[in-house]
Image: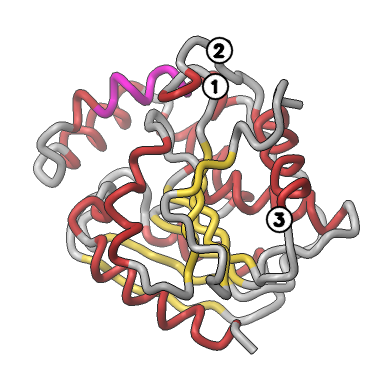
Amino acid sequence: MADSAHRWIVPLAERPAAGVRLYLFPVPGAGASFFTPLAPELPPHIEPLTFEMPGRGSRRRERPVHLFRTLVREITEDIRRTTDARPAVFFGHCAGAIVAFETARALVAAGLPGPRLLVASASPAPPEAWRLLHRKSRPDRAVTSLWGERRETADLWLLALRLARDVPLIVSYRYRPGGRLGCPVSLCVADRDRLIPRACVEEWRSCTSATTVTRVYPGGHMYLRHQWPELARHLTTDTAGLIG
């Protein structure tokens, strides 16, 4: 575990009276500051928290994590140490949604409350993740996907360079069949995402025994950087029923 308590969790807005805790899971290649623009768009009843991974941001001098299971274990432990009676919502973009999914399973396996809602954004369903990564590992397919995506993301090549540091972490993931989530799953897809096919996102429906809803946003794989107000509006709608 981290040397000092709560080193992973970073509050984006101090809202101790908020009725819902929103955990924003790490985006590959990015630090905790990635989600900063979302915080002021959220209503007072939602407390946004994210995670700072070793090797970036305030923890840039620490050795990065290269094993997916280690990342999940550390995040799960910090959530366990800071959890309270308020309902939690997990949000993850791309591989961050898979971290959220595995963290939810780890919490439930430990006899702790899982999230009341999981939001998966532009992410392949966990059972699909390894198969998709294997297909994308072919140089011709990878280049084709990136070349198509560049029209939607002006700084795509810079983002790709930052993502490279998380490649060992991503490829270390192995999905293990187990119990499905008991909470609803909201799916966020971009209408011009060339990296993650919508069919792979829709496969999340097999990962929950509850209902799912799909919302489509304009843009490419990194659509959310231009859709913070709309995303906040949808999160507000989805969490409205969680406060008693």
Mark-to-mark CA distance, 3 and 1: 21 Å
Q: Nearer the viewer, mark 2 or mark 3?
A: 2
Q: Nearer the viewer, mark 3 or mark 1?
A: 1
Q: Quadrant of the N terminus?
A: top right
Q: Nearer the viewer, residue 30 or 166?
A: 30
* Position in image of residue 194 (x %, y %): 26, 47
Which quarter of the figure has residue 208?
bottom right
**Residue 189 higher or lower than 81, as above or below:** below
Are dots 2 and 3 in contact, CB under 8 Å? no
Residue type, label 2: Glu
* Position in image of residue 196 (x %, y %): 37, 48
Magenta residue span: 159-166
Horizontally, residue 105 falls left or right of residue 90, namely right
What main secondary structure does the magenta stretch of the protein show? helix
Whichever of callouts 2 and 1 sits on the residue coming sooner in the sequence is 1
State the residue position of label 2.
62
Mark 2 is surrounded, within 10 Å at the Cα level, by few (under 14), some (14 to 19) or many (20 or more) other residues, namely few
Residue type, label 1: Pro
